Image: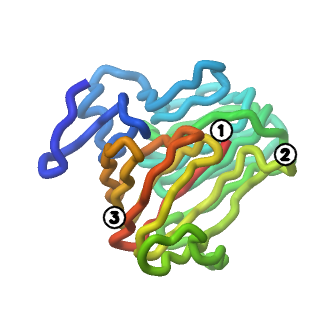
């Protein structure tokens, strides 16, 4: 897969220690004929991350596992068989819980970044609208592994199973440099801010707004946040 420099228009790197794509909204520049884009697919087939596309019209929408979607473009109404209606628009974060079944009525072509993983059922679908400006954020404290500075985190917890699986939400982090060890597979769609993740191998991953990334369990290195980050996430 061709990779372009950060001083050019876009970058995709699927063989990275943390597969990533920037900018996510222009994924079809790389894959013009693809129905969907897969950033990562686990060997056990329980986890998949990437970008999904729905064409205009009504289609069946069902998920056997949890599915987190962040809408990039387009609009649609998701209707569950139980009568729940979800109005999806750019900036909407939807956590479809295990067993969700219904339809998608796309008004126009709908694109959403996503990750699937084992989770559990729920009576209502967790939804967060206008993610870029969503408030209030709960203070989650300072990063405990600081190297330089005082990075502080805050966010909104959208959904989490009692055993800690399938945690999703919105996360922010102020500038600073800290040690990063990923303890569970994590999907990230960075919406604001800039930083550099440096793997222990020396690989550098540059993050800027609209970067889609998947950090596998066991990834370790350091993170230098230059401008406050805002991302949506799902942790397996």
Out of 172 and 28, give the one closest to the viewer.
172
Question: SS at mark 2?
Answer: loop
Tag 3 and tag 1, C-beta contact below 8 Å: no
Tag 2 and tag 1, C-beta contact below 8 Å: no
Q: Is residue 91 left or right of residue 135?
A: left
Percent x, y for residue 155? 61, 70
Percent x, y for residue 26? 29, 41
Residue tagged 3: 194
Residue at the spot 54% in from the left edge and 44% down from the top edge: 187
Percent x, y for residue 111? 44, 39
Out of 107 and 153, give the one closest to the viewer.
153
Tag 2 and tag 3, C-beta contact below 8 Å: no
State which tag comes first along the sequence, 2 or 1: 1
Out of 29 and 179, give the one closest to the viewer.
179
State which tag comes first along the sequence, 3 or 1: 1
Q: Report, in whole angstroms, how far the alpha carbon at label 2 lies from the one at label 3.
A: 35 Å
Residue 56 seen in this snapshot: no
Residue tagged 2: 122
Percent x, y for residue 215? 50, 43
Residue at the spot 70% in from the left edge and 40% down from the top edge: 79
Question: SS at mark 1?
Answer: strand
- Quadrant that contains the C terminus: top right
Q: Is residue 205 left or right of residue 231?
A: left
- Quadrant that contains the N terminus: top left
Residue at the spot 79% in from the left edge and 50% down from the top edge: 164
> Label 3: few (<14), some or many (≥20) within 10 Å?
some
Residue 195 seen in this snapshot: yes
Q: Which mark is residue 67?
A: 1
Q: Is residue 199 positioned above or below 156 on the image? A: above
Out of 106 and 27, give the one closest to the viewer.
27
């Amino acid at each position: 897969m061709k990779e372009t420099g950060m001083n050019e228009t876009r970058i995709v790197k699927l063989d990275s220690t943390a597969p990533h794509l920037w900018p996510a909204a222009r994924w079809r520049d790389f894959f013009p004929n693809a129905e969907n884009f897969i950033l990562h697919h686990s060997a056990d087939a329980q986890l998949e991350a990437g970008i999904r596309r729905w064409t205009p019209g009504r289609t069946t929408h069902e998920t056997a596992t949890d599915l987190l979607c962040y809408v990039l473009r387009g609009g649609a109404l998701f209707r569950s068989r139980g009568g729940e209606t979800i109005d999806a628009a750019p900036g909407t974060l939807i956590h479809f819980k295990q067993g969700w079944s219904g339809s998608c009525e796309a008004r126009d072509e709908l694109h959403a970044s996503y990750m699937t993983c084992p989770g559990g059922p729920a009576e209502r679908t967790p939804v967060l609208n206008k993610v870029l400006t969503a408030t209030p954020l709960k203070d989650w404290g300072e990063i405990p592994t600081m190297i330089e500075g005082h990075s502080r985190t805050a966010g909104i917890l959208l959904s989490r199973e009692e055993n800690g699986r399938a945690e999703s939400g919105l996360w922010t982090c102020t500038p600073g440099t800290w040690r990063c060890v990923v303890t569970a597979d994590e999907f990230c769609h960075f919406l604001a801010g800039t930083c550099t993740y440096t793997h222990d191998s020396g690989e550098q991953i540059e993050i800027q707004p609209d970067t889609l990334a998947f950090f596998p369990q066991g990834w370790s290195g350091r993170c230098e946040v230059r401008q406050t980050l805002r991302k949506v996430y799902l942790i397996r």
